[in-house]
Image (cartoon, coloured by chain):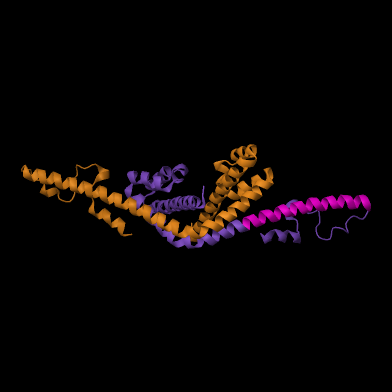
Chain colours: A orange, B purple
């Protein structure tokens, strides 16, 4: 899928999510004045249906026009209030999550390296020659192998 | 939920969707060079897991660190390329979808009204009921009715 298509699909997913939040808002309002209808709306609004906000509204329009129109109005207000913040929140959210995950990986790798150095130090003190295994110790489990090149992944 | 919380959750949903698209991109690349791994990634990446992009990446990190790091890099690139367009695409997307739905509703209501008028006209002037229908022809199929008044709904 090209970038334009991905942007389009991402906007659709965002709109569907705002439609879900608008439904929640309208449901909370109904709970105050018309509790039975609030329960009905909750039962009608399954997660599956809300994956596609437009199809959901089309279906709701046939069931209860007033509620559908209300959700449409609320989602538009919600969008007006939050969309301007989305680019920064999404960019920073991804950057921070990626950075934390890479830092954690680096910490684990450094710990393994440190543990390795301690083992070597103990081996040297007790006179066991392990020098030939300076780069990698094959006795390590596969997923904790200490590979200094792995740090390159952070450069991207 | 207050607006700030809704904005935060919307950003999370958007990030999870970009993580899914990044997975698809990486999967397509793997298909060229390492088809078995591409199949594995597809099986690992269930829709349920991808509802939460961060939990998905944490899990993937334990299974295949290289692929997880690659997906993290790709989603960051995707975000850099598309987030700036999101506010307008989401706002316009909602406005257009709402407008079309309201126009359709108004058209249907006008048809019902016109049909009603036709019945009355036929009752009043038996034999020549068509003159009163200058604006809309009730013989049109429901969803292709041409009604210039429908444009009023666009005002919202």
Q: Quadrant of residue B133?
A: bottom right
What type of secondary structure mainly makes up the magenta span? helix
Q: Quadrant of residue B148?
A: bottom right
Instruction: Give the total number of marks visible in the rendering.
Output: 0
Query: What is the x, y in percent for residue A133?
Result: 14, 48
Residue B130 vertical placement versus B1 (above, below): below
On the image, the x and y values in percent for residue B130 come to: 88, 57
Name the image quarter holding the C terminus of chain B.
bottom right
- Residue at the spot x=52%, y=55% of the render? A9
Outermost residue to the front = A32
Whether residue B81 sits left or right of residue B63 in the image: it is right
Seen at 72% across and 60% down, the residue is B152
Residue ranking furthest to the left: A127
- Where does the image place residue A95, in percent across and percent down from the top left? 38, 56
Along the line of sight, which residue is nearer the eye, B12 or B23? Answer: B12
Examine the structure image and report whether residue B122 is included in the region drawn in magenta.
Answer: yes
A81 up-or-down from A131: above or below: below
Q: Residue at x 54, y 57 (%)?
A: A81
Asked if residue A68 can be seen in this view, the reply is: yes
**Residue drawn at 62 percent across, 55 percent down:** B97
A129 in the magenta segment: no
Residue B82 at least partly seen: no
Left or right: B65 in relation to A148: right
First to last magenta residue range:
B96-125
| Front-lying residue, B50 or B154 | B154
Q: Position of residue A20 (x, y in %)?
A: 56, 47
């Amino acid at each position: 899928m090209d970038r334009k298509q991905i942007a389009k699909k991402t906007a659709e997913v965002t709109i569907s999510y705002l439609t879900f939040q608008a439904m929640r808002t309208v449901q909370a309002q109904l709970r105050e004045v018309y509790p039975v209808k609030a329960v009905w709306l909750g039962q009608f609004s399954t997660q599956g249906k809300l994956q596609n906000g437009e199809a959901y509204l089309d279906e709701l329009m046939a069931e209860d026009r007033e509620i559908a129109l209300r959700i449409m109005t609320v989602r538009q207000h919600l969008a007006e209030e939050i969309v301007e913040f989305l680019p920064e929140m999404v960019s920073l959210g991804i950057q921070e999550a990626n950075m934390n995950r890479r830092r954690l990986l680096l910490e684990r790798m450094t710990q393994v390296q440190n543990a390795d150095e301690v083992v070597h130090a103990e081996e040297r003190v007790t006179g066991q020659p392990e020098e030939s295994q300076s780069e990698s110790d094959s006795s390590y489990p596969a997923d904790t192998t200490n590979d200094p090149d792995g740090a390159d992944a952070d450069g991207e």
